[in-house]
Amino acid sequence: MQLTRQTEYAIRTLIELVRAPEGVMVNSKAIAEKHNLPEKFLNKTIQILARAGLVETRRGMQGGIRLAVSPDSLKIADVLAAIEGKLALNPCLGGDYHCENQYLCPVRKVLQRTQEAILAELSKETFADLAKGEVTCE
Amino acid sequence: MQLTRQTEYAIRTLIELVRAPEGVMVNSKAIAEKHNLPEKFLNKTIQILARAGLVETRRGMQGGIRLAVSPDSLKIADVLAAIEGKLALNPCLGGDYHCENQYLCPVRKVLQRTQEAILAELSKETFADLAKGEVTCE
DNA sequence: TTAAATAAGATATTATTAATCATATTAGTA
DNA sequence: TACTAATATGATTAATAATATCTTATTTAA
Ligand code: SF4
Ligand code: SF4
């Protein structure tokens, strides 16, 4: 029951991008160094964000990454979904696994509501808000 | 961001115990067979619950396990704490790891609130309630 | 053409979760 | 007492997931 580190890396990266002047390409290596993150692994993370449509990347000199969405609509829940996939507290709440009892099971109902509560909390603040505070430590 | 299987096993076991006649020792092997769970692993799980004070065990013939708490006060949040330890969505929300920024960081605040929401949801219904529905599938 | 940047896939490492094994302990009962 | 049915415990293994690195390719501006 934890966020993966990769999710934290992604959140920090996005905050950096929100703070950067709009439209400017930010160097990924610089982000890795600033936050002391493994560079290659961060690149992977960025690729995932790119495929999910949250950032744009550009190769070559003067290349880098930048936001592809508005900071006003981006939420931690989106990052979680991009990196870890759709939230499923239990297999029966995911798409694949089908449990016979799932329409009756009271446990499932509790977990379902819990999930909804999680997503609600993680959708309350946008990255525009988050970027105002300090998020610099490792 | 998932419950471990062990937590599900624990929840099912506890529901079985709540449903059993009060005070009667239930055979752990029977629970394992009914739910098709790995027997030895379930025993470990039961030990954890026993150490956490949620169940009582008794060895020898006529032995077994039974609830050590009232179904009216037992909640999924308690099981989660017993099996997975105190909830910490991010290292900075746990006891060990101390992050310089943790009093300012807006991300941490969001995660903190999310955690509280999770625990609130998982504390709304008691096992007395849960045991009324069907929880039988694998 | 070169240097600076990300992309991609394969691989390795580490940590966690899940399961099993072997053995010990307990207690009722014949 | 000896036997049997039960859980306890610690060591070990197996499986899975998370984290990190390596290598090579591709892109682009200068
Ligand atoms: S028993 Fe309930 S919570 Fe468990 S898998 Fe089935 S529906 Fe889901
Ligand atoms: S940056 Fe914020 S969320 Fe991340 S570890 Fe530090 S306090 Fe916690």
Image (cartoon, coloured by chain):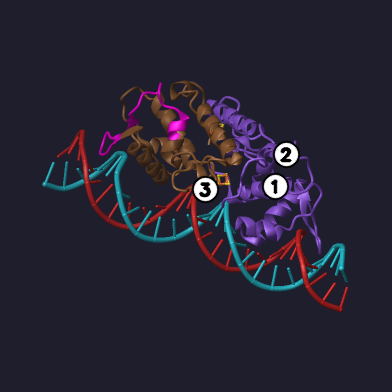
Chain colours: A purple, B brown, C red, D cyan
Q: Secondary structure at mark 2?
A: loop
Q: Callout 3 environment at 10 Å: few (<14), some (14 to 19), or many (20+)? A: few
* In the depicted structure, whether residue A56 falls above or below residue A110: below
Viewer can see residue A28: yes
Give amino acid for label 3: Glu
Q: Callout 2 environment at 10 Å: few (<14), some (14 to 19), or many (20+)? A: many
Q: Nearer the viewer, mark 3 or mark 2?
A: 3
User: Residue visible at 63% across and 35% down?
Assistant: A122
Q: Secondary structure at mark 3?
A: loop
Pointers 2 and 1 in contact (CB under 8 A)? yes
User: Residue visible at 62% across and 32% down?
Assistant: A121
Pointers 3 and 2 in contact (CB under 8 A)? no
| Span colored in magenta | B57-79
Q: Residue B9: which numbered mark, if any?
A: none
**Residue marked by disc 1:** A14
**Residue marked by disc 2:** A74
What is the chain letter for disc 1? A
User: Residue visible at 63% across and 57% down?
Assistant: A34
**Residue marked by disc 3:** B100
Q: Secondary structure at mark 1?
A: helix
Q: Earlier in the sequence, mark 2 or mark 1?
A: 1
Give amino acid for label 2: Leu
Find out whether residue B73 is within the magenta segment: yes
Quarter of the rendered structure image containing ligand 2: top right
Q: How many marks?
A: 3
Which corner quadrant of the image does residue B86 belong to? Answer: top left
Whole-percent x, y for residue B118 in the image: 54, 32
Whole-percent x, y for residue A64 in the image: 77, 57
**In this view of the protein, which residue sits in the foreground, D8 or A110?**
A110
